[in-house]
Image (cartoon, grey):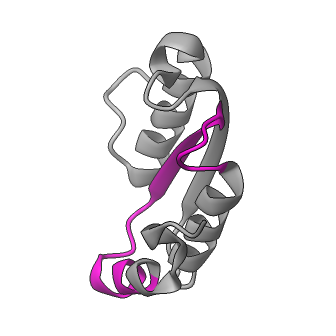
């Protein structure tokens, strides 16, 4: 089965329409909705716009990653903030 987001058109539009800000894609190892390969493909399309894109694979279920792998989740978000120049003082 092919999901609507498995076509490149929406990804290509997003890469062209949005400013090339640093982007974090967080995905779950136990996720049937958005698989790691699909997330990696999305990240690669965004990278065509000279955007820094980070992909983090965490342990857990879709939308429950802060609960199941909170330390790595927080580390990933903190790294994004640092790269974007948005980290609060003291980080």
Horizontally, is 85 left or right of 70 in the view? left
Horizontally, is 11 left or right of 19 in the view? right
Q: Is residue 49 visible?
A: no
Question: Picture coordinates of residue 25 (x, y %)?
Answer: 52, 50
Horizontally, is 11 left or right of 32 in the view? left
Question: Picture coordinates of residue 72 (x, y %)?
Answer: 61, 23
Horizontally, is 29 left or right of 22 in the view? right
Q: Which one is nearer the viewer's eye here, 34 or 2?
A: 2
Q: Residue furthest front?
A: 1
**Which image quadrant: the C terminus?**
top left
The answer to whether 21 is drawn above or below residue 13 in the figure is above
Question: Picture coordinates of residue 44 (x, y %)?
Answer: 63, 73
**Which image quadrant: the N terminus?**
bottom right
Q: Residue at x 64, y 50 (%)?
A: 35
Residue 10 belongs to magenta span: no
Q: Is residue 16 visible?
A: yes
Question: Picture coordinates of residue 18 (x, y %)?
Answer: 29, 76
The answer to whether 8 is drawn above or below residue 54 in the figure is below
Q: Residue at x 53, y 38 (%)?
A: 79
The answer to whether 74 is drawn above or below residue 1 in the figure is above
Count of numbered circles on the image:
0
The answer to whether 24 is drawn above or below residue 2 in the figure is above
The span shown in magenta is 12-35
Q: Residue at x 43, y 87 (%)?
A: 9
Looking at the rendering, which quadrant does residue 59 occupy? top right
Q: Residue at x 54, y 72 (%)?
A: 6
């Amino acid at each position: 089965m092919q999901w609507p987001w498995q076509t490149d058109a929406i990804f290509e539009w997003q890469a062209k329409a949005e400013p090339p800000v640093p982007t974090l894609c967080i995905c779950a190892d136990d996720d049937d909705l958005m698989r790691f390969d699909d997330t990696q493909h999305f990240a690669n399309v965004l990278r065509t716009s000279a955007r820094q894109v980070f992909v983090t694979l965490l342990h857990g279920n879709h939308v429950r990653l802060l609960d199941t792998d909170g330390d790595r989740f927080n580390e990933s978000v903190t790294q994004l903030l640092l790269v974007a120049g948005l980290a609060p003082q003291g980080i």
